[in-house]
Amino acid sequence: MANKPSIPKGTRDFSPIEMAKRNYIFDTIKEVYALYGFEQIETPAMETLHTLMGKYGEEGDKLLFKVLNSGDYISKVTDEELQTRNSLKLATKLCEKGLRYDLTVPFARYVVMHRDELQLPFKRYQIQPVWRADRPQKGRYREFYQCDADVVGSDSLLNEVELMQIIDTVFTRFGIRVMIKINNRKILTGIAEVIGETDKIVDITVAIDKLDKIGIDNVNAELSANGISDEAIAKLQPIIALSGTNEQKLNTIAGVLATSEIGLKGVEETRFILNTLQTANLNNEIQLDLTLARGLNYYTGAIFEVKALDTPMGSITGGGRYDNLTGIFGMPGLSGVGFSFGADRIFDVLNTLDLFPKEAVHTTQVLFINFGEKETAYCIPLVAQLRKAGIRTEIYPDSAKMKKQMGYANAKEIPYVVLVGENEMNTGKLTLKNMTTGEQTQVDIDELIEQVSK
């Protein structure tokens, strides 16, 4: 008895309809990236473990999928090493490569390897799958796509402004109403300074970043558990609860951070970004949120996150400014700013709100019914003419019963069916059936192209 086929846990098959929807997302994002001068690169699915290890912390190293060396990979391992059962140590002997964990480290490696060929600032985008040996659960997979865009080699805040415009343009095209939240890690560092907890900046940012999820009481409890004094926590409360317009918040926090040079620098940067965006006529609201911290500690300047307004969902886009991306590969001093669209979450939002355009999902527009060899021979040049006009067209391959062919059209939600029998061949007119309304009309090939094209 043959084994029942299966796929690895945490991976997925995608149906034709799902692929059409995913391609709509990717194509829309690619078109907008190109509008702003970003160029696409791709990097290998596999990187050397030397490139990957030590870049994501100890937990990240454990989540790397490692690839066994080809050939007799066990020959280089001694019996004593095997008996230790130390998987991480054995992996260094058995594996030289691993599947990429994200697109950021491969991008840093790419910049260093190709630095002599790159025109700085380098504006790159990358849409590829990544792999993590995480525990699969709802919404979390071992294989998933990232849609990254980064600008490296420029300190200009106009890059941040453009990234906000890209985000606004993409979600406007999708028809998704979003809130773009922005903050600055320098402001957060300044807050830690003025409350007297400079060395606890990571603990503070990690805790307040959870405010939306766990509430203020649990955030305060976490801060206290991490050794932050009651006095410092009390000073944090009015900052976390700050309300008003972006301008009012900036003015208030500037007063709070009056003694912090780095904090005031963050206020200045944020003010420039927000003031410049006021002239860009964004379709979506951008809001200064002083509780936004982002989990990754390598952010050094502006940070931003996007949430859908019409359906509950976590962050669907996020990113920020970082320094020294390429320093991990011996090329220090290269600043950058970037973000990633969460393709899977955007897919769920578009599905929930029924925002996928019909033309993006329904691939074939016209189906020619097959009545036999003579009729098919007559239809083939007509089918070619429609395809030349850019109309996605099929001819049913077999001379099957009409019910079966119509069932095929219905199952694929093909909007138009063309019937060509003896009468149609004699008159030169085609019978066009609108599968939505059921209406049948007599048209010539030019009228057919015009009607379907509309």
Image (cartoon, rainbow, N blue to C red):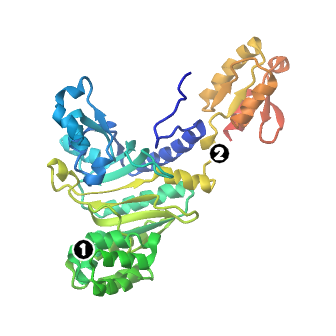
Image disc number at residue 288: none
As drawn, 166 above or below 48: below
Q: Secondary structure at mark 1?
A: helix
Q: Position of residue 175 (x, y in %)?
A: 57, 57
State which quarter of the image contains the N terminus: top right
Percent of width and height locating residue 68: 28, 32
Please tell me whether mark 2 or mark 1 is closer to you in this view.
1
Indicate left or right for 170 with 441 as reference: left
Q: Residue furthest top?
A: 374
Say which quarter of the image contains residue 299. Answer: bottom left
Residue 131 position, x and y percent, is: 38, 43
Residue 92 visible (yes or no): no
CA neighbours of label 1 inside 10 A, class few (<14), some (14 to 19), many (20+): some
Residue named by callout 2: 358
In terms of depth relative to the viewer, which is nearer, 52 or 115?
52
- Amino acid carrying label 2: it is Lys
**Residue 200 circle label:** 1
Residue 43, given in percent of the width and then of the height, sits at 31, 38
Quarter of the figure that contains the C terminus: top right
Q: The residue under label 1 is which amino acid type?
A: Lys
**Quick one: 269 or 66, which is closer to the camera?**
66
Q: Is residue 77 left or right of residue 451?
A: left
Q: Is residue 272 above or below residue 421?
A: below
Residue ID at (70%, 23%): 396
At x 38% / y 86%, what residue is drawn?
238
Residue count near mark 2 (Cα–Cα under 10 Å), binned few <14, some 14–19, many ≥20: few
Residue 124 vs 442, above or below: the answer is: below
Q: Residue at x 20, y 74 (%)?
A: 199
Is the residue under label 1 in contact with that under label 2 (CB below 8 Å)? no
Can the viewer see residue 243 in this picture?
yes
Earlier in the chain: of badge 2 and badge 1, it is 1
